[in-house]
Amino acid sequence: MVYSKYQKISKSKAEIKKITINYCKNKKRNWFVADAECYNAHSRRYKDLFGFGDLIVIDDIELPGVLFIQITTETHAENHIADVLYDVKKRVYAKELLIKENRIWFFFFKKDKNSKWTYRIQKLTLKDF
C-alpha cells in the first residue's frame, strides 16, 4: 500500500466528507466528485457503493478510470482495509475495479493534540491482494 504524510486541517468531525471533497475539487485537480453513499430510511443506515466507496471521482485527463474513496477515522482504519481485503464480495469488487485501471483510496482522519483534524491517504493496489 502507498502511504502519504498526515496533512493538517482544522475542521469539525461533521465536515470530514467536505474536507475530502475539497481535496478533490481544489484548483490544481478540479476533479468531478459524486457522493456514492446512500441513506436507507428503513434501516436508518448509510450504505456505500460496493461496500467501500463513499465518493466517486472522475477525471479523464489526470486519472484514467474512476477513483473510489473510502472515508473513515484512524481508529477504524485497519477494520476498513481488512474488510475490503478479506470479505469475499468486497474483495471481488475491489480486485475487478483495480484490474480495469480504477483506483481505491482510503482517507483516514484523526485529531492531533491541538484538536485539529489531520488526514492521511492510503492507496490500495493489486499487490495488496
Image (spheres, rainbow, N blue to C red):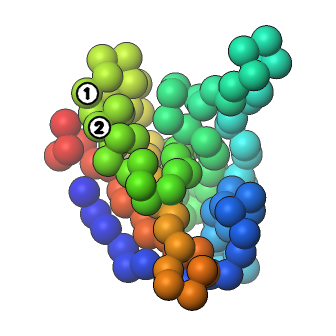
Query: Residue at point 20% right, 44% down?
Result: 128
Residue 15 position within the rendered picture, expressed as x and y whole percent measured from the top left: 74, 62
Residue type at the position of mark 2:
Ala
Nearest to the observer: residue 6 or residue 62: 6
Q: How far across and how far down the image is residue 59, in percent?
A: 62, 56
Furthest toward the bottom, the residue is 114
- Give the residue type that dot 1 points to: Tyr
Residue at far right of view:
41
Is residue 87 left or right of 32 when viewed as pictured? left
Q: Which residue is mark 1?
A: 86
- Which element type, helix, strand or loop, lies under badge 1? helix
Question: Looking at the image, is 36 positioned above or below residue 6?
Answer: above
Whether tag 1 and tag 2 are in contact, CB under 8 A, the answer is yes
* Residue that badge 2 annotates: 82
Q: Between 106 and 113, which is closer to the camera in this rendering? A: 113
Quarter of the image for the C terminus: give it: top left
Question: Can you tell which quarter of the image residue 102 is in?
Answer: top left
Q: Position of residue 6 (x, y in %)?
A: 43, 78
Mark 2: give few (<14), some (14-19) or many (20+) Cα within 10 Å.
Answer: few
Relative to residue 62, is residue 117 depicted above or below? below
Residue at (39% x, 24% y) in the render: 90
- Give x and y (percent) for residue 32: 72, 55
Q: Secondary structure at mark 2?
A: helix
| Distance in Å between CA atoms under marks 1 and 2 | 6 Å
